[in-house]
C-alpha cells in the first residue's frame, strides 16, 4: 500500500499542521509516513502546500509526484495542482473553488469545508480539521481513532472539543454525499 496526498491552499489555513497530524496518525497504525511542506514568503495568504506519503514499505523519495488525493481549499491551488492528478485520483475541493469543465479525475468531491468551519463550528480556523475528517472518509487506511488522537495531541489546549466536532463534521460531509 502506498498513498500520496497533497493538501493545498493558502497560508493560515492550517494545512501544514493537517499534514503533520495525518502523518502522525498513520505511523500509530504501523505505516511509514513522510510529510513535507512549502509555503510562500507571506505569513498568511500566500501559497501553502503540505504533502504526505503513507506506505507499508520504505519511502525512498519524500515528494509527491502524482497525488492519490489532492485537497484544494483555494482557486489558486486548484489552478496550480489539479492538472497533475491521475484519472483515478481523489480530488477534494472546497465549494468556493470553481472547477469548471476541467475535472481530470473520476473521483471529485466538492464540499463546503470552509463554510462548515465558519457556520457549523463557528471558527474558520478549524477548516483544516474539517478537511481531515473528509479525507479520513475517503482514504480507508486512515483509522478514525488514531487520527483523533493525533488531532488531540496537536491542537491548542482548551480547543479539543471544538476540533473533534470539526473532524466529525468533515466526516459527515462525505457520508452525506454517499447516501
Image (tube, rainbow, N blue to C red):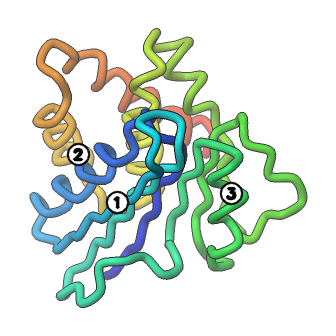
Label 1: element kind: strand
Question: In the rendered image, which residue does mark 2 sit on?
Answer: 147
In the shown orientation, is residue 18 left or right of residue 70? left
Whole-angstrom CA distance, mark 1 to mark 3, is 24 Å
* Labels 2 and 1: the sequence-earlier one: 1
Whole-angstrom CA distance, mark 2 to mark 1, is 19 Å
The residue drawn where x is 67% and y is 55% is: 78
Residue 95 lies, in percent from the top left, at 70, 36
Image quadrant assignment for residue 62: bottom left
Quadrant of image for the C terminus: top right
Residue 167 higher or lower than 70, as above or below: above
The residue drawn where x is 41% and y is 60% is: 139
* Labels 3 and 2: the sequence-earlier one: 3
Quadrant of image for the N terminus: bottom left
Question: In the rendered image, which residue does mark 3 sit on?
Answer: 108
Residue 41 lies, in percent from the top left, at 44, 48
Residue 39 lies, in percent from the top left, at 43, 53
Mark 2 Cα-neighbour bin, 10 Å: few <14, some 14–19, many ≥20: many
Q: Which mark is residue 37?
A: 1
Residue 165 higher or lower than 31, as above or below: above
Label 3: element kind: strand
The residue drawn where x is 63% and y is 43% is: 74
Q: Which mark is residue 172?
A: none
Whole-angstrom CA distance, mark 3 to mark 2, is 23 Å
Which one is in front in this view, the residue at disc 2 or the one at disc 1?
Answer: 1
* Labels 1 and 3: the sequence-earlier one: 1
Q: In front here: 24 or 10?
A: 10
Amino acid at each position: 500500500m502506498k498513498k500520496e496526498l497533497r493538501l493545498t491552499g493558502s497560508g493560515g489555513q492550517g494545512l501544514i499542521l493537517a499534514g503533520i497530524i495525518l502523518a502522525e496518525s498513520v505511523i500509530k497504525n504501523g505505516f511509514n509516513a513522510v510529510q513535507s511542506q512549502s509555503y510562500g514568503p507571506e505569513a498568511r495568504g500566500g501559497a501553502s502546500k503540505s504533502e504526505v506519503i503513507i506506505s507499508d514499505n520504505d519511502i525512498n523519495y519524500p515528494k509527491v509526484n502524482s497525488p492519490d488525493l489532492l485537497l484544494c481549499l483555494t482557486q489558486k491551488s486548484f489552478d496550480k495542482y489539479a492538472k497533475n492528478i491521475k484519472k483515478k485520483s481523489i480530488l477534494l475541493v472546497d465549494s468556493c473553488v470553481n472547477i469548471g469543465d476541467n475535472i481530470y479525475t473520476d473521483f471529485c468531491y466538492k464540499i463546503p469545508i470552509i463554510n462548515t468551519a465558519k457556520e457549523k463550528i463557528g471558527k474558520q480556523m478549524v477548516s483544516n480539521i474539517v478537511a481531515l475528517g473528509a479525507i479520513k472518509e475517503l482514504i480507508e487506511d486512515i483509522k478514525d481513532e488514531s487520527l483523533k488522537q493525533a488531532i488531540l495531541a496537536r491542537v491548542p489546549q482548551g480547543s479539543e472539543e471544538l476540533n473533534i466536532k470539526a473532524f466529525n463534521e468533515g466526516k459527515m460531509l462525505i457520508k452525506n454525499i454517499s447516501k
